[in-house]
Image (cartoon, rainbow, N blue to C red):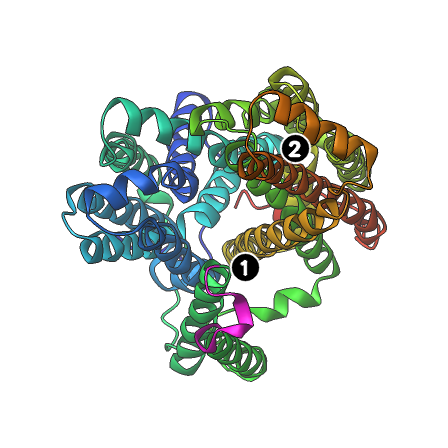
Amino acid sequence: MAATPENAAPLKPLHGMPLVLLTVAVAFSTFMEVLDMTIVNVAVPHIAGSLAVSPNEGTWTISSYSLASAIMQPLTGWIARRFGEVRTFVTSVLLFVIFSMFCGLATTMPMLVFGRLMQGAGSGPMVALSLTLLLSSYPKEKQGIALAMWAMTVVIAPIFGPILGGWLTDNFSWPWIFYINLPVGILAAIVTWTLLHKRETKTVKAPIDMVGLVLLVAGVGCLQFMLDNGNDHDWFASPLILTLGLIAFVCLTFLVVWEIHAKHPVIDLTLFKQRNFTVGVISLSLGMFAFFGINVVFPLWLQTTLGYTATWAGLAAAPVGVLAFLLSPIVGRNMHKVDLRLLVSWAFIVFAITTYWFSTFDSAASFGTLVVPRFVMGLAIPCFFIPLNQIYLSGLPASEIASASGLSNFFRTLGSSVSTAVMVTLWQHRGIAHHANLTEYVNPAQPGAAQYIQQLSHLGFGATQRLGYIDQIITREGYTLAVNDIFYGCAILFVILLPVLWFARPPFGSAGGGVGH
């Protein structure tokens, strides 16, 4: 198949049924790739039990996937230029399918971890290229819809991951969380190749920047491993985590310097010369840091402190996807009528209000009480992701969309990883601090405490039982106060991000100033 020559006439956008089929194929393949980041979370105990390893070792199934995916995302632009966007996307989908099957058939933990590493590496370019292919296939006036469809799948998949993972694991067995990728992936690959193989992008046979590649793999690999495992090893008190942190810092510092001066860089850092790209990526990364932190700590608090099951914790978190799903196409269709900075500002304000709302709850909050702010938060999601994608892509030529999308996805993933590590650690430390503070009030000098202890003794509790019961209550309240602190902190971060957005420079025309070839 010949590459499209530079002087060829621009390809016309797709219309009608081919465009619908392509949108469904690309959206579902992206959905499955993002879903696989969270679907395994609830199945870790089952996987660990089945393969006779500890739950701690079971979490390698999560970290190995995110590690490989994080390394591949910034490479997307270089790979797409070297082999063509369509060919790279279809190969990525097929590798994802093959290694999903491999993961499902795994009989030992090393086999499963290898499968997850390869699944993450194979699927790394999928998310960024799915956006690039959609934008290049849609008419310019409808590219907002393409962005909306893409953002909807990327945002909703992590929310539904734990629910679907829990249901499949409880009703079938854990390998089915991988097997469900097969029919979706195969159909997506066939449809995409059939519709787009004659629309392949121009390829450039540039030499491989081996120094940049080694620095990227070592730097990002060590950073991701450190973030995934730091909490279990007490962070920098562990020589392993300290060593990984130092290697990551040195490699990534040298990577930035090297890539700026490299003749054929593996990552195009010149994109940061574009003000809108820089502002968009900063807003997306820090916004994702706060948003993901909420989504990590909330179900964790429900399960470990309030006694929710994995399924019910998932159901409590899920309502955030309802309005996001319904409003995304509307926002996408009407985005060109509004200043995008206003839309994202509205999103940050809604996030700040609902997050602050969460910070006021106590441990007696009912399921219905918890669901309402999650539902309202859905108002903000389409106004956050869709316009920000348009902001960082505005003004970029079509040839740079894959690189820009890959790099921004890397920072989005990094924001999520850093958020998980920081928020969980912070929550645990604040929980211990609150526990210590509350314990000071349990003494005979406090009338309320003395009365409560007396009531417990009347109920037949022994001295040890009374102290044990009170300690349970203090622990529950301590971790609830800690989760309130996290939500309050995230609300403040959303407010701080508001002025950052306004450094972006309008106009925000169709992505790429005419991505549609």
Image position of 427 (left or right of 81) = right
In the image, 355 versus 259, the foreground residue is 355
In the image, 285 versus 404, the foreground residue is 285
Work out whether residue 197 can be spotted.
yes
Q: Which residues are magenta?
A: 232-241
Image position of 154 (left or right of 508) = left
| Image spot of residue 31 (x, y percent) | 42, 35
Snapshot quadrant of residue 184: top left
Residue at 33% in and 60% down: 83
What residue does disc 1 label?
A: 407
Task: Kindly identify the amino acid type of the residue bearing the numbered disc 2.
Answer: Ile
Work out whether residue 513 can be spotted.
no
Q: Using a 10 Å C-alpha cutoff, classify the residue at mark 2 as few (fewer than 14 neighbours), some (14 to 19) or many (20 or more).
A: many
| Image spot of residue 317 (x, y percent) | 56, 28
What residue does disc 2 label?
A: 381
| Image spot of residue 476 (x, y percent) | 62, 36
Snapshot quadrant of residue 281: bottom right
Upstream in sequence: badge 2 or badge 1: 2
Secondary structure of the residue carrying numbered label 2: helix
Secondary structure of the residue carrying numbered label 1: helix
Q: Is residue 238 magenta?
A: yes
